[in-house]
Image (cartoon, helix red, strand yellow):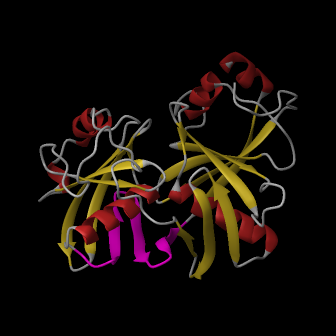
Amino acid sequence: MRAMDTRAQTPLTFMKMHGLGNDFVVVDARARTFDLTDSQITAIAHRQKGVGFDQLAVITHGAAGSNADAHLTFYNADASTSAACGNATRCIARHLMDETGAESLTLTTDRGTLFAREAGEGLVSVNMGQPQLTWDEIPLSEAMDTLELPIDGVPTATGMGNPHCTFFVEDVAAVDLATFGAAHEHHPLYPERTNVQVAQIVGENHIRMRVWERGVGITLASGSSSCATAVAAARRGLTGRKVQIDLDGGTLWIDWAEDGVWMTGTTEHVFTGQFTEAFLERAK
């Protein structure tokens, strides 16, 4: 059982959001407590029998004594946890800024403290923190150079609070991502599994990228994957530190700055709904 109070009232309200088609169920737990089992999370994630999501995000109050506006917790579609989820962070930041009128926020996650700000023209920026570049931080299963892994295709390993494996290819459309991503998610070099990206340099500081997320599968976009790909491209001298990344669901702008990796893009709050007591009970 998840570490949330079992004295839940029903119905449980949620928001459906997405960032470039990377979609989320968001539950605001600041005003009430609840408990979800792994089986309930996977039931909610089911795209025919539930709501469907790439990640479930839970908003709680920041820790006592901190200056955080909120704390965010993320679950993948298979109920595993993720310390970071960039697009969900941007979506929730937009919601909280609209709610409070603030133009900047401090958010805490298992990844650490993240900063979000209004970027104008419907865009939201989030600083995803400094990338993790050493084998033990990512983590990998043994000591090695993370720039070129001893895997066919010599991908680059990067940590963004979750592990990433980025392959630079001639044509991302030619890759059978369903097979390729599933095979590499569970590579023995990644003890915690990995997100898998295939990336193509299409112009100066311009990348086309597709992504397979661990615990989810193919997604239309991924914020942390975009940050990891931008960092990998800059480390390999393929681009500068500020790039445009075109994903299946749209475009993100990534800036690997001195204070961390900033990610900017659009967000969408699609609808607000409620889970029925009967659905949650059957899904236990």
- The residue located at (80%, 54%) in the rendering is 61
- The residue located at (79%, 25%) in the rendering is 277
54 versus 69 height, above or below: above
From the top left corner, tell me how far across and down residue 174 is, in percent.
14, 50
Left or right relative to 36: residue 142: left
Secondary structure, magenta segment, majority class = strand
Q: Give residue 2's quadrant in the image.
A: top right
Region in magenta:
239-266
From the top left corner, tell me how far across and down residue 25 is, in percent.
63, 45
Q: What is the tally of numbered marks visible in this picture?
A: 0
Left or right relative to 38: residue 66: right
196 versus 117 height, above or below: above
Left or right relative to 181: residue 161: right
26 versus 95 height, above or below: above
- Was residue 128 drawn as part of the magenta stretch in this picture? no
Q: Give residue 256's quadrant in the image.
A: bottom left
The one nearer the camera, 167 or 246, is 167
- The residue located at (26%, 78%) in the rendering is 205
Q: Give the quarter of the figure containing the C terminus.
A: top right
The one nearer the camera, 22 or 30, is 30
Residue 231 visible in the picture: yes
From the top left corner, tell me how far across and down residue 209 is, in percent.
29, 59
93 versus 14 height, above or below: below
- Was residue 241 drawn as part of the magenta stretch in this picture? yes
* Residue lying farthest to the bottom in this orientation: 120
The one nearer the camera, 78 or 268, is 78
Q: Give residue 90's quadrant in the image.
A: bottom right
From the top left corner, tell me how far across and down residue 22 is, in percent.
48, 52
Residue 268 visible in the picture: no
Q: Give the quarter of the figure containing the N terminus.
A: top right
* Residue lying farthest to the front in this orientation: 143
